[in-house]
Image (cartoon, coloured by chain):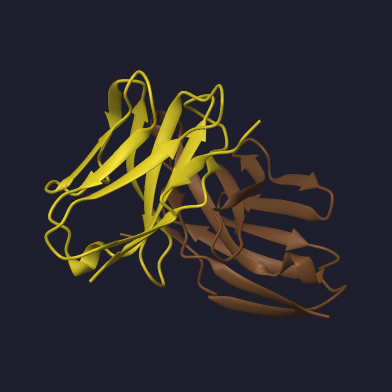
Amino acid sequence: NAGVMQNPRHLVRRRGQEARLRCSPMKGHSHVYWYRQLPEEGLKFMVYLQKENIIDESGMPKERFSAEFPKEGPSILRIQQVVRGDSAAYFCASSPISFGGEQYFGPGTRLTVT
Amino acid sequence: DQQVKQNSPSLSVQEGRISILNCDYTNSMFDYFLWYKKYPAEGPTFLISISSIKDKNEDGRFTVFLNKSAKHLSLHIVPSQPGDSAVYFCAASAGDSGNQFYFGTGTSLTVIP
């Protein structure tokens, strides 16, 4: 059973470009979570999605950031018009249930904005 | 607003001794707590969890203690092994928003052979 897959592992973008980060949850998991880890900080929750639904996006910046989890295919975290402050490690996690269970993390995508 | 705090950014322990990693939280609604271990360039790996109905949970060399009145939890690793060297994050969630986990900033553990 493959774990949570994220790609790309490393992404370099110039200021103003768009970044697309992909996450394929573990087989059988229908709950996906995105976290961001800034340097010297812990993981910060961004958004929680189920298939075709955003359940909780309270941690997502109001502008430039969006997430989706379509019926088919991976979950996508999109950052438009990236700025230097977006440079961080972005982790995706999945779980089989929504409450009270551990989340399984992918290896992360390290975004560098130059 | 950091609701989960790990005040020790780093810890060094001799191999074979006990490692104690601490975590404090501020939200009394938190009722489920987890510890994750993270190696460089990898995602966090689930280690052990505890719900608020318990004050202790043990899994092999790893034991998590929860003190609800003090809003404090700790992870004990005994005996510590060099392979335990990693960053450890504690995380917490509240039952009514169980899908959102709040993470501490992590403690980097180094086990010296």
Which image quadrant is residue B82 in?
bottom right
Q: Which of B95 and A64 lies nearest the eye of the viewer? A: A64
Which image quadrant is residue B10 in?
bottom right
Q: Position of residue B102 (x, y in %)?
A: 43, 49
Q: Is residue B70 visible?
A: no
Q: Residue at x 22, y 71 (%)?
A: A114
Which chain has been coloured brown in this picture? B
Q: Residue at x 20, y 69 (%)?
A: A84
Q: Is residue A101 above or below residue A12?
A: above
Q: Position of residue B56 (x, y in %)?
A: 73, 46
Identify the hue of chain A: yellow
Q: Position of residue B42 (x, y in %)?
A: 56, 57
Give the left or right position of residue B101, taking residue A45 as reference: right
Q: Is residue A45 visible?
A: yes
Q: Residue at x 53, y 39 (%)?
A: A4
Number of numbered callouts drawn: 0
Q: Which of A32 and B6 lies nearest the eye of the viewer? A: A32
